Amino acid sequence: MAAPSSPARIALLDDHPMFRQGLRYILQSLPYVAVVEEASTLPGLLAICAHQLPDVLLLDMQMPGADGAEVAQQLLGQYPDLKIIVLSMFSADKYITQMMKLGVRSYLPKDANQEELIQALEGVLTTGHHFTPRISRALMRGLQQPTRPPSAKLQEQEQFTPREQEVLRLICEGCTAAEIAAHLFISRRTVEGHWQKLLEKTGAPNAAGLVGFAAKHGLLES
């Protein structure tokens, strides 16, 4: 994935100073990160957002006295363009599904390594999301409806071209536009065109919505 071309403002919301310092150290080493701002409380973060909205927020899901989902919902209700990457000790499907459905752009375990963090950040900055296989599996398991009649599944498939179905499957596997282009031997611009068509046809707001649609309608069953 190509590194972001524009300087980025990153905000951190976490109540552990040492964890924030570690994240700051990593982020400040990246050439495209211009500003890193920290907050240990939601009011502190809201003050940062009121001054200037960050390009990406790294959000701790476990804040003292605050539920991560409620914090994300409040932030996105007030700042719908805010791109959130959740950092969490919880890896159960229900937590991932809940946060992705709220509109966060990626979900990482707190024990993710530096490379995984950078990949997520670059994915969100360049494409608006970072969709990992772990997120895809969680959404598909959470939304799968195996009792859906086969005829209904075929009807859903008929609205997509064969190429769109290929792109949809690769999106659901967590591939980026660049990775899909390389896999299908087509240009990234062509992939982005198919991606946009899929969003329009399904009414999904983002890649998480596409995976949810595919799982719900049985489009990924072999």
Image (cartoon, rainbow, N blue to C red):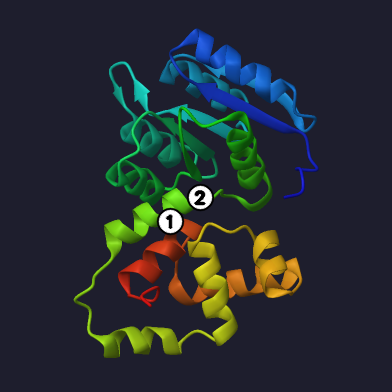
**Marks 2 and 1: in contact by CB < 8 Å?**
yes
Residue 51 falls left or right of residue 74:
right
Q: Quadrant of the C terminus?
A: bottom left
Query: Which label was assigned to residue 136?
Result: 1
Task: Looking at the picture, tell me which residue is in the foreground, 10 or 24.
Answer: 24
Q: Locate residue 171 relative to residue 7 in the image: left or right.
A: left
Circle 2 residue: 132
Between 37 and 115, the one lying in front of the other is 115
Kindly state the secondary structure of the residue where label 1 is placed.
Answer: helix
* Picture layout, residue 4 above or below residue 148: above
The residue lying at 55 percent from left, 67 percent from top is 170
Identity of the residue drawn at 52% across and 9% down: 18
Amino acid under label 2? Answer: Thr
Local SS, label 2: loop
Q: Position of residue 98 (x, y in %)?
A: 32, 46
Task: Indicate whether 23 appears above or below 209.
Answer: above
In x, y percent, where is residue 79? 50, 39
Separation (CA) of disc 1 from disc 2: 6 Å
Give percent across and percent down for residue 113: 56, 30
Q: Nearer the viewer, residue 151 or 197?
A: 151
Disc 1 residue type?
Ser
| Rendering quarter of residue 62 | top left
Residue 154 visible, this orientation: yes
